[in-house]
Amino acid sequence: MARIISIDYGQKRTGIAVTDNLKMIANGLTTVETKNLEQWLKEYFAKEEVDTIVVGMPKQTNGEDSENMKRITPFVNRLKKLYPEKTIEMYDERFTSVLAHQAMLDSGISRKARQNKGLVDQISATIILQDYMNSKGF
């Protein structure tokens, strides 16, 4: 069975999470430098079967697009051209960074580890994926 991958796209770093083969559990996978993201995805898709790509859609609290959307929209359009066989969906990612920081606090991760922005991005991608899965009834 194919996996679902989620992408928390950032200007410098991108957090990535993925489901298990049964699409039951969302797990943080890695953080990739955004400039290397498309190559990383190509290599990952060559090894793993993925049928859905969920990209975090950053919105401001008032519902307007955030500044990062001007980078995300062209990225999503490239994905659609490169992988027409995959479902590509955008999913509201408001507050995922806040939730990621809270999850890190609740888990007892050290202060130094909580300052690892890559870990925050990875946890944010996991939250996006879990919320997406919940919304789709997985």
Image (tube, helix red, strand yellow):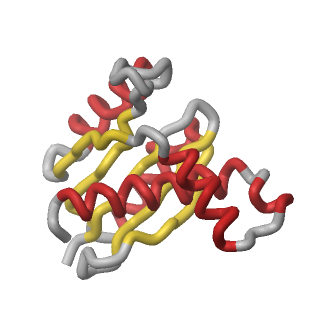
The reply to whether residue 74 is in sight is yes
Task: Residue 47: tell me if it is visible.
Answer: no
Q: Residue at x 15, y 67 (%)?
A: 137
Determine which quarter of the picture holds residue 52: bottom left
- Residue 105 in picture, x, y percent from top left: 69, 63
Q: Kindly identify the residue that appears in the image at 25 percent across and 63 percent down.
A: 134
Estimate the x, y position of residue 44 in percent, counting from the top left: 42, 62
Quadrant for the N terminus in the image: bottom left
Q: Quadrant of residue 61?
A: top left
Q: Is residue 58 above or below residue 36?
A: above
| Residue nearest the observer in this picture, 70 or 137 | 137
- Name the residue nearer the viewer: 118 or 130: 130
The residue lying at 39 percent from left, 70 percent from top is 26
Most extreme residue toward the right is 112
Residue 113 placed where, x, y %?
79, 62
Residue at image position (16%, 44%) is 84
Compared to residue 63, the image places residue 25 above or below, namely below
Depicted 65 relative to depicted 127: above or below? above
